[in-house]
Image (cartoon, rainbow, N blue to C red):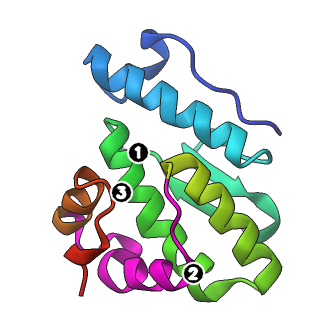
Amino acid sequence: MKMHVLHTAKDFEHYTNNQKNVDGLKLILNKTKKAFPNANITLKNELILEPKNNLYFILTGVQNELEFKCKLIAWMSRPISKGLNEYWSLKMLNSFNEVLGTNLTKSDMRKLYTNFGEDTNRTLSMQFVESGFDLSLLK
């Protein structure tokens, strides 16, 4: 099942009524679709990024691009840094970097997992994203 990208503000009503947030979500979902070609959104609102490795997160509660990026970091940092074999780790890291416009390494992803893994520190995660992914903010 291929990911269908939502194209109208009405499609995003369950996320937000703010047009700027809607536009940001559309943009980041389109980037995600290009970077993760096997991605899809299930009826349970799960964004499955790579079905073969069961890499996914729930979109419920994501209201804007910033929250999407924080969730992507929270749920992809562990598998990329230590949960996948080398082939899949590199492939997912490249896709991750493509979505966020970053050039993070596997070592950087371990730092992200330590600080934000499984969404343990959303405040710092938001600061990190808003800083343009400044790694000096991390331990």
The relative height of residue 65 versus residue 94 in the rendered view (above or below) is above
Residue 35 image offset from top left, x and y in percent: 69, 46
Q: Nearer the viewer, residue 8 or 138?
A: 138
Identify the amino acid type marked 3. Cys
**Residue neighbourhood size for the residue with mark 2, other residues' Cα within 10 Å, grouped as few (<14), some (14–19), many (≥20):** some
Tell me: residue 52, above or below residue 67: below
What amino acid is at disc 2?
A: Lys
Q: Are marks 2 and 3 in contact (CB under 8 Å)?
A: no
- Tell me which segment is drawn in magenta: 102-122
Q: CA distance from mark 2 to mark 1?
A: 28 Å
Residue 52: x %, y % from top left:
82, 65
| Alpha carbons under labels 3 and 1: distance apart | 13 Å
Q: Name the residue that disc number 2 marks.
A: 106
Amino acid type at mark 1: Thr
Q: Which residue is mark 1?
A: 60
Asked if residue 115 lies in the magenta stretch, the reply is yes
Secondary structure beneath dot 3 equals helix
Q: CA distance from mark 2 to mark 3?
A: 17 Å
Residue behind mark 3: 70
Which quadrant of the structure image shows residue 18? top left
Please provide percent x and percent y for residue 11: 49, 17
